[in-house]
Amino acid sequence: NLDDKQSPQFISFFVDFRKDVRIVNDSIRSEVDKMGAELDSSTPNEANIKSSLANIDRLWSKREDIRRDFHAEISKLLTVVQMAKVMVFEERFERKLIETMECFRAGQQPPVGP
């Protein structure tokens, strides 16, 4: 429900947000893989594991900061109702994604609907 003025600005903010999150997620995956390889070794190095844990924690914080910054930017652009719809959508989407993943792991069909 964006008007003609909001739409291009929102899309620009969203594209930047997704790009930044993708970069951080790639770094998280890389760090997790590195830590996993360390854990798979016959003699895992605790210093390397601690470093990976700290890096992952830092990256999680960075990802959350990116989300918070995105919300701050779009809240200047959107009405209160539009902002609420964004937050409801994000939360429900994440919940649905988790439910779907759990169903696939259990060998069941995911539920249909919101």
Image: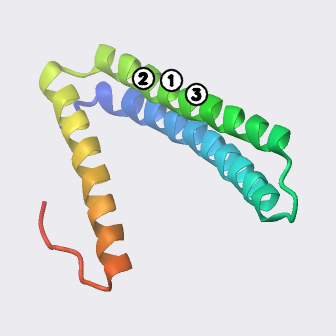
Between label 2 and label 3, give the one nearer the viewer: 3
Q: Which of 53 and 44 is in front in this view?
A: 44
Location of residue 79 in the rendering, given as x and y in whole percent from the top left corner = 18, 20
Location of residue 47 in the rendering, given as x and y in whole percent from the top left corner = 84, 38
- State whether residue 27 is above or below residue 113: above
- State whether residue 34 is above or below residue 99: above
Residue shown at 65% from the left, 45% from the top: 28
> Gap between marks 3 and 1, in whole Å?
5 Å
Location of residue 70 in the rendering, given as x and y in whole percent from the top left corner = 43, 25
Image position of 1 (left or right of 104): left
Tag 1: amino acid: Asp
Residue shown at 37% from the left, 30% from the top: 10
Q: Label 2, secondary structure: give it.
A: helix
Residue 62: which disc? 3
- The answer to the question of whether label 3 and label 1 lie on touching residues, with beta carbons closer than 8 A, is yes
Return the residue at label 1: 65
Where residue 68 sits, quadrant-wise, is: top left
Image position of 3 (left or right of 33): left
- The answer to the question of whether label 2 and label 1 lie on touching residues, with beta carbons closer than 8 A, is yes
Return the residue at label 2: 68
Tag 2: amino acid: Arg
Q: Residues within 10 Å of mark 1 (few under 14, many from 20)?
A: few
Tag 3: amino acid: Lys
Image position of 12 (left or right of 55): left
Q: Earlier in the sequence, mark 2 or mark 3?
A: 3
Q: Label 1, secondary structure: give it.
A: helix
Q: Label 3, secondary structure: give it.
A: helix
Image position of 83 (left or right of 25): left
- State whether residue 28 is above or below residue 80: below
Extreme residue in the front direction: 43
Residue shown at 50% from the left, 34% from the top: 17
